[in-house]
Image: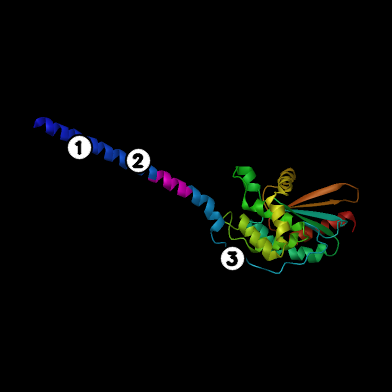
């Protein structure tokens, strides 16, 4: 009788051990399944999540637009803007000052203007990888292949919803490009091939070499009456009066 009881106890212990092992296997399988589902979600969600609505605007007119340049290349003064499509101060310059600069100095042949990207400023300095600003810069250069750089430029500023929160992820840039009126097959081929990655990287290197410490920064250059090249930095989203002062002083020194 005691031997039978001892066997029953051993059987019960084996059953308990088997149940624990099975429970452990089930829990482990559950964790693996949840992990796989989570990883799949990370890959799939960016492709299916709803996009923020794209705002369509009427772009500002640009005299003698040529890619990321506007104005007469033979103008006595050249201004390069280093900016970021996610930068609120760059957006302020675009909304409040740029059109006045166009009307007063670019249309009149006194200033040749170039927009260059420094939207990878944070990622290059802090090692954060590629940012949406850098994506936007490449998209704008691709639009330039269709002679619509400035149209895309304006649409990008019109569709900022925050910094690196989805404003310029790939799918939304596609929607913005389509709303701008680009040939989408040509745009997608350009953007997906990273055609302008080297250009965006060079923009950043040139900005650093020019002494740019943030966006927007403007490099005003001209050749004075003595034949010497003069360069001046204008930092921040300055009002038109600051540009007027710098430009008029340069024109006086040139003798124009």
Left or right of residue 81, residue 10 in this image: left
Which corner quadrant holds the N terminus?
top left
Q: For this rendering, which residue is in front, 141 or 218?
A: 141
Quarter of the image holding residue 65?
bottom right
Question: Magenta stretch mostly in which secondary structure?
Answer: helix
Which mark is drawn over residue 12? 1
Which mark is drawn over residue 25? 2
Specify whether residue 109 is painted magenta. no
Dot 2 crowding, Cα within 10 Å, few <14, some 14–19, many 20+: few
**Quick one: which residue is furthest to the bottom in this view?**
58
Dot 3 crowding, Cα within 10 Å, few <14, some 14–19, many 20+: few
Mark 2–mark 3 Cα distance, whole angstroms, equals: 46 Å
Please state the extent of the stretch shown in magenta in the rendering: 30-38
Mark 1–mark 3 Cα distance, whole angstroms, equals: 64 Å
Q: Residue at x 76, y 61 (%)?
A: 148
Image coords of residue 182 (percent x, y): 72, 62
Which mark is drawn over residue 28? none
Image coords of residue 244 (percent x, y): 78, 61
Mark 1 or 3, nearer chain start: 1
Image coords of residue 165 (percent x, y): 56, 56
Give the secondary structure at mark 1: helix
Q: Which residue is drawn at 31% across and 42% down?
A: 23
Which mark is drawn over residue 53? 3
């Amino acid at each position: 009788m005691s031997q039978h009881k001892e066997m029953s106890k051993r059987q019960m212990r084996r059953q308990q051990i088997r149940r624990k092992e099975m429970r452990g296997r089930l829990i482990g399988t559950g964790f693996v399944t949840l992990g796989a589902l989570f990883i799949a979600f990370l890959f799939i969600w960016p492709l299916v999540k709803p996009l923020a609505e794209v705002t369509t605007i009427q772009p500002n007119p640009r005299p003698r637009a040529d890619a990321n340049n506007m104005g007469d290349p033979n103008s006595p003064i050249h201004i390069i803007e280093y900016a970021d499509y996610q930068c609120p101060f760059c957006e302020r310059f675009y909304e409040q000052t740029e059109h006045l600069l166009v009307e007063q100095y670019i249309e009149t042949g006194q200033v040749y203007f170039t927009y260059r990207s420094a939207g990878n400023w944070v990622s290059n300095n802090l090692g954060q990888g590629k940012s949406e600003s850098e994506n936007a810069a490449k998209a704008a250069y691709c639009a330039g292949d269709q002679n619509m750089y400035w149209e895309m430029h304006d649409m990008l500023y019109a569709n900022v919803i925050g910094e690196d929160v989805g404003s310029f992820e790939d799918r939304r840039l596609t929607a913005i490009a389509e709303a701008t009126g680009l040939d989408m097959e040509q745009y997608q081929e350009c953007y997906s091939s990273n055609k302008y990655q080297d250009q965006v990287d060079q923009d950043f290197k040139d900005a650093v070499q020019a002494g740019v410490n943030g966006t927007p920064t403007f490099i005003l250059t001209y050749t004075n009456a003595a034949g010497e090249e003069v360069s001046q930095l204008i930092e921040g989203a300055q009002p038109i009066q600051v540009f007027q002062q710098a430009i008029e002083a340069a024109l006086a020194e040139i003798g124009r």
